[in-house]
């Protein structure tokens, strides 16, 4: 057998094992009874170990060496050359981590996530502190093992946003912060729009049906995907032809199911749009968390919270909920779903203030990694940053430093990708608007095929073939920056708030 076929065969098995883990995790979050928890943890650990061992095997290492000359001869952008390059990158990372460190991280983060739950319930940071210290120690060791050019944080960031650097994120965030902080202060001087009508009783099935109808209109293919309920919405992929999303439905708040579904559908359409020739290789799937988030934010915010979109869908929504929305004019509805208000909780933040929550976390987690900040000083540092950036002081740790699970789960370097996703979504949308004639008119008619087709053509089909930076250069001719997003925010919210 040719080396490349043998490599594909081995990687196919790795992909299968990973997909089986994804199915088990999806089931755990949707249908599994609580009693299944211990057995499920065991099953996931077994599959994870098998997949890891198969991937870092000597045979994969030898095949990669054997294939290096071939990769050099091939067109650098061909599927095969890219496959070899991406597998080499993943392989080097996976083999640099000692098995004992991987196991210790898995154990410590499991324990510290448990501790986080208790600490958050009691709003008592001291209960989490020793666990978080342990996790951060292990993450520092992980960064050393992976290697980095400038700062240990680079190594962790690279896990979620390959090729991105801490200094670059810091530079982009500085631009954002300079403009956003005064903008949010200016908005705060205006009266807060009334959105109380979004918080009435809404029939759950009707909410579900409406949201899924829009997702399907967007182009989420229900022949190759489905939606279920879970406590926290997510999307996951078992293959290009089987992509799942979950949502949560609150009877007393309309936005939760609706925008949650549009967000996850954006993620799912990315996975469904990967070229089928990449199926069962390590190239299937999103290229980075930032690019993934750009796809969800594009559909959720740039389309789903836009005026043209609602000029088509608001009448339909009113027909579903005549008692609740029948007398609410569209402009009032549009203002309500775009209400800007500095708040303490990231996951409830609006489009304008969301990135401020990310900056706060980025500044703190880079300081924790570099040793400039100790875990013991973290709660006070959090409150100080919150005052500085959001103008708010959390009344307790639960609504401050303890609100997110990420750090206790070992996910340091992950937060920035949410903000990068917002920025990339605006860069891509700006380009799509230039290239698709009458895009806004199409959206106002409930037609999305051209937009989705554009994304497929320029982003989705490539899977992991190109890094985020390479993709952006191909599509818009330049790299990540904050300009397009700031222009979008200035235009939209300047008009909404008369700035
Ligand atoms: Zn997302």
Image (spheres, rainbow, N blue to C red):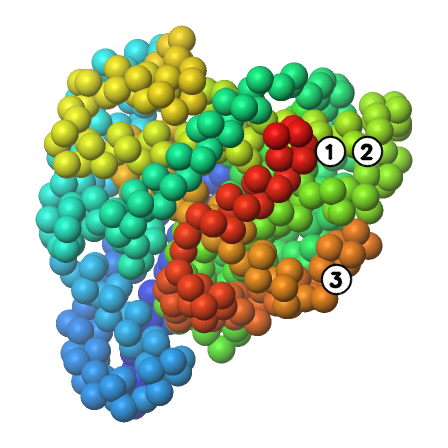
- Evaluate if marks 1 and 2 touch, with contact meaning CB atoms under 8 Å apart: yes
Q: Is residue 57 above or below residue 302?
A: below
Q: Is residue 383 left or right of residue 305?
A: left
Q: How many marks?
A: 3
Classify mark 1 as within 8 Å of ligand 1 or not, answering yes or no: no
Residue 423, x across and y down, in percent: 47, 48
Mark 1 Cα shell of 10 Å, populated few (<14), some (14-19), many (≥20): some
- SS class, disc 3: loop
- The residue tagged 1 is 334
Q: Secondary structure at mark 2?
A: helix
The answer to which image quadrant residue 254 occupies is top right
Circle 3 sits on which residue?
Answer: 438
Label 1 element class: helix
Q: Please tell me which residue lies in front, 32 or 463.
A: 463
Task: Please say whether residue 104 is visible from this viewpoint.
Answer: no
Question: CA separation, marks 3 and 2?
Answer: 22 Å
Residue extending farthest front: 499
Relative to 121, is 363 on the left or the right?
A: left
Tag 2 residue:
330
Is residue 457 at all visible to an observer of this figure?
Answer: yes
Q: Which mark sits nearer the N-terminus, 1 or 3? A: 1
Q: Is the residue marked 3 within 8 Å of ligand 1, measured from its CB?
A: no
- Residue at 42% of width from left, 39% of height from top? 176
Q: Residue at x 21, y 59 (%)?
A: 94
First in sequence, mark 3 or 2: give its number: 2
Horizontal and vertical percent position of residue 207? 74, 35
Tell me the quadrant of the picture where the C terminus can be found: top right
Mark 1 and mark 3: span between their CA atoms?
22 Å
Q: Could you tell whether 86 is left or right of 448 in the image?
A: left
Task: Look at 75% across and 62% down and name the residue there.
Answer: 438
Instruction: Choose between 222 and 446: the one closer to the eye.
Output: 446
């Amino acid at each position: 057998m040719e080396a490349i076929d043998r490599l594909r065969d081995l990687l196919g098995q790795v992909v299968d094992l990973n997909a089986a883990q994804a199915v088990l995790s999806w089931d755990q979050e949707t249908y599994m009874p609580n009693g299944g928890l211990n057995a499920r943890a065991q099953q996931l650990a077994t599959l994870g170990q098998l997949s890891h061992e198969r991937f870092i095997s000597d045979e994969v290492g030898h095949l990669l060496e054997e294939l290096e000359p071939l990769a050099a001869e091939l067109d650098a952008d061909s599927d095969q050359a890219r496959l070899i390059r991406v597998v080499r990158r993943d392989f080097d990372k996976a083999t640099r981590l000692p098995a004992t460190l991987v196991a210790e991280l898995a154990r410590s983060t499991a324990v510290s996530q448990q501790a986080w739950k208790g600490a958050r319930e009691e709003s008592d940071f001291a209960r989490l502190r020793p666990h978080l210290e342990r996790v951060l120690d292990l993450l520092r060791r992980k960064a050393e093992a992976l290697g980095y050019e400038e700062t240990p944080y680079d190594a962790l960031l690279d896990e979620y946003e390959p090729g991105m650097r801490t200094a670059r994120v810091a530079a982009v965030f500085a631009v954002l912060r300079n403009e956003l902080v005064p903008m949010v202060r200016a908005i705060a001087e205006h009266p807060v729009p009334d959105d109380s009508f979004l918080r009435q009783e809404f029939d759950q099935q009707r909410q579900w049906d409406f949201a899924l109808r829009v997702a399907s209109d967007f182009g989420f293919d229900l022949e190759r995907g489905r939606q279920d309920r879970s406590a926290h919405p997510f999307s996951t992929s078992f293959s290009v032809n089987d992509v799942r999303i979950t949502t949560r439905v609150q009877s007393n708040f309309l936005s939760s199911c609706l925008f949650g579904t549009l967000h996850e559908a954006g993620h799912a359409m990315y996975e469904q749009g990967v070229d089928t020739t990449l199926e069962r290789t390590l190239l299937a799937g999103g290229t980075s968390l930032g690019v993934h988030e750009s796809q969800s934010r594009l559909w959720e915010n740039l389309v789903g919270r836009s005026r043209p979109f609602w000029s088509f869908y608001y009448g339909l929504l009113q027909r579903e909920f005549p008692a609740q929305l029948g007398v609410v004019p569209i402009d009032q509805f549009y203002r309500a779903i775009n209400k800007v208000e500095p708040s303490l909780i990231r996951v409830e933040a609006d489009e304008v203030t969301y990135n401020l929550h990310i900056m706060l976390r980025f500044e703190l987690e880079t300081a924790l990694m570099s040793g400039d900040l100790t875990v013991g000083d973290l709660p006070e540092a959090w409150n100080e940053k919150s005052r500085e950036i959001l103008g708010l002081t959390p009344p307790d740790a639960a609504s401050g430093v303890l609100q997110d699970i990420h750090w206790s789960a070992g996910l340091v370097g992950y937060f920035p990708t949410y903000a990068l996703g917002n920025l990339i979504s605006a860069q891509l949308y700006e380009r799509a608007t230039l290239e698709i004639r009458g895009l806004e008119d199409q959206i106002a008619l409930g037609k999305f095929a051209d937009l989705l087709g554009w994304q497929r053509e320029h982003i989705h089909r490539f899977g992991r073939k190109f890094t985020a930076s390479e993709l952006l250069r191909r599509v818009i001719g330049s790299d990540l920056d904050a300009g397009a997003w700031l222009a979008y925010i200035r235009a939209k919210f300047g008009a909404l708030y008369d700035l």
